[in-house]
């Protein structure tokens, strides 16, 4: 992995950040509400997270739906 790719993968977000991600319905925007650094149960599944690869809970701007994604799936907006 090149150092540039490593920097992208390690990009971190904080609670309150406005982000965009791609879903089955197209691009969705929302705000990060929680950061997980340990494995957690969500919607009946175990999601794997660590300090090196956290997962983020995001509340959709449009529907108030909560989604969980790794940082690689997110892009900061604003």
Image (spheres, helix red, strand yellow):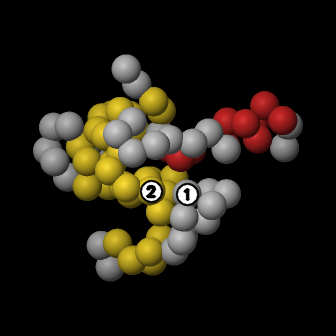
Looking at the picture, tell me which residue is in the foreground, 2 or 51.
Answer: 51
Bin the neighbour count of mark 1 within 10 Å (Cα to Cα): few under 14, some 14-19, many 20 and up: many
Q: Residue at 32% x, 50% y: name it.
A: 33
Callout 1–callout 2 Cβ contact below 8 Å:
yes
Q: Residue 14 location, x and y as percent?
A: 46, 43
78 lies above or below 33: above
Looking at the picture, tell me which residue is in the foreground, 15 or 66.
Answer: 15
Relative to 36, is 23 on the left or the right?
left
In which quarter of the view is residue 38 placed?
bottom right
Badge 1 or badge 2: first in the primary sequence? 2
Q: Which residue is mark 2?
A: 35
Q: Residue 35 location, x and y as percent?
A: 44, 56
Label 2 residue SS? strand
50 lies above or below 4: below
Q: Residue at 50% x, 41% y: name it.
A: 13
Relative to 7, is 33 on the left or the right?
left
Q: Residue 51 location, x and y as percent?
A: 63, 61
Q: Residue at 67% x, 36% y: name it.
A: 8
Relative to 77, is 63 on the left or the right?
left
Q: Which residue is mark 1?
A: 54
Q: Residue at 47% x, 63% y: name it.
A: 36
């Amino acid at each position: 992995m090149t150092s540039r790719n490593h920097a992208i993968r390690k990009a971190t977000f904080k609670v309150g950040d406005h982000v965009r991600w791609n879903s089955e319905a197209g691009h969705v925007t929302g705000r990060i509400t929680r950061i997980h650094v340990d494995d957690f149960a969500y919607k009946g599944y175990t999601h794997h997270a660590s300090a090196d690869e956290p997962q983020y809970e995001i509340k959709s701007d449009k529907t108030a739906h909560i989604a969980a994604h790794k940082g690689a799936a997110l892009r900061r907006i604003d």
